[in-house]
Amino acid sequence: MSGSNGQPYASGVTALSGLTIDVEKDWLTNPISNIGAPKTDLSALPRGLVKEYGSDYGLNWADLGAITGAAINSTSYLGNGIVVLGCADNHVWRSVNYGLTWINLGVIAAGGVYVISYLGNGIVVLGDASGHIFRSTNHGLTWADLGVISGGLIFSMVYLGNGIVIFGDQLRHVWRSIDYGATWADLGIIATNQIYSMAYLSNGIAILGDISNHVWRSTNYGAAWADLGVIATNGISSMAYLGNGISILGDFSGHIFRSVNYGATWADLGKIGDQVQSMSFVGNGVVIFGDQLGHIWRSTNYGATWTDLGAMGANALPSAACLGNGVVVVGSGVNHIWRSTSAFGNDNNFTQYSFDKTIQFGCLGAITPNVTTYLAPGNGITQVNEIKIRVTAPGLLGNLFVQQRVASGAGGTTEVYTVRVNGVDTAITCTLNNVLIGSDIAHSVLVAAGDAVSIKVVSNNAVDTSADMIASLQIS
């Protein structure tokens, strides 16, 4: 049996008993992004995009407690539920379940971590207080020190697309990379003072702010910069792009400034909160910022007006990141992480969908009870022999979602769904005990081109009545 490229598959892969299908040719869907729905809404997934569940983004917050050992200065979302954050004690922390739980990767940086930026394709870069740049090519799992790049503390960084990333430092320099952060060029002294914030707007337009209140603007992907003059009142500390040409910035005096023409001109909205520490655009017109006193402020009209949600503790909130589907995390100066999810659901009844590529398995009709079987690619029937889908490009496999039309029945009847790679069980599992929907967003595994993926189903009861199911996985 041969693949779509005419080459024979690996030994032992034969029709049905070891069927292998090229994901990108047969069972790979088009990209789907930024959708979500309560699990109680069983028709949400078949209906397609679900956007009506976004009216309270960033409104409800929960304190996850003291997570890190030092102030959380930077947070970045990498997709597929993966978040990384950097701390003042040189540590990097990583979450694979949309910021719900965290793993300490240990001391990564040479100094306090102030900026982390995701460049796509699993590539992440961070800058620290010693001028070092560190780079990861596997979604933040491991890091390589590129050495001292800047002569000063790296305060700000932003990705501009097409492999172009820039950062600004304490010495007023802007540095630029055109190869996804692998090498860097010094553009020289650009700003009037230390560069604390940057944002990418659209179509090559980027802005930066310094602590002398100036805004600088580039229209050629950061290659050259024009000084727009004094905009802020007391040092520009944070910037964010909200789409449709709308940008906002905050300063150390608590003023918010807003632009509706891609950063060309700015209007002062006045003093809103205390010193602005962090900003994040959540979606549906919702944007938040955290201030020096620990308050979170929220706007639902693209930053035009603001509401104080109150203090999330009594300390500064120097980092914030939107994780999609209304999930936001904010890091505090006293090691706490605050997390917001939509009131339409919480972690027990809200399924995240943010798919780059998906693999689909299924079973039309009843499963075979009280035995081990395997789901078929697409919507076939369960098989005694393992049927696999071959991955044609490397990536991170995870985000298992399972839905059934008929549940297993009462009396302790369960099924355990386990994702397998190359015939070996992984940690990606989902157990359904007389329920219709389940998921595993906590586990993921790296897969290489040519790896074969399957889903094993173990039924533990002879009267198991489960029928008509679909299971999907994401590769990002």
Image: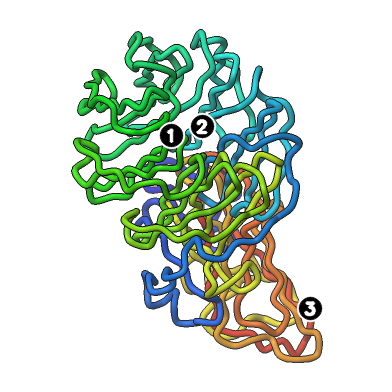
Q: Quadrant of residue 207?
A: top left
Q: CA distance from mark 1 to mark 3?
A: 45 Å
Determine which residue is flagged by label 2. Answer: 124
Name which of mark 2 and mark 1 comes first in the sequence: 1
> Where 325 sits versus 200, above or below?
below
Q: Residue at x 71, y 90 (%)?
A: 409
The secondary element bearing badge 1 is classed as strand
Which amino acid type is shown beneath numbered disc 3? Asn
Residue 454: % across, % down: 60, 59
Which amino acid type is shown beneath numbered disc 2? Val
> Where 396 sits versus 176, above or below?
below
Q: Residue at x 71, y 71 (%)?
A: 431
Determine which residue is flagged by label 1. Answer: 119
Q: Are marks 2 and 1 in contact (CB under 8 Å)?
A: yes
Closer-to-camera residue (134/427): 134
Q: Quadrant of residue 136?
A: top right
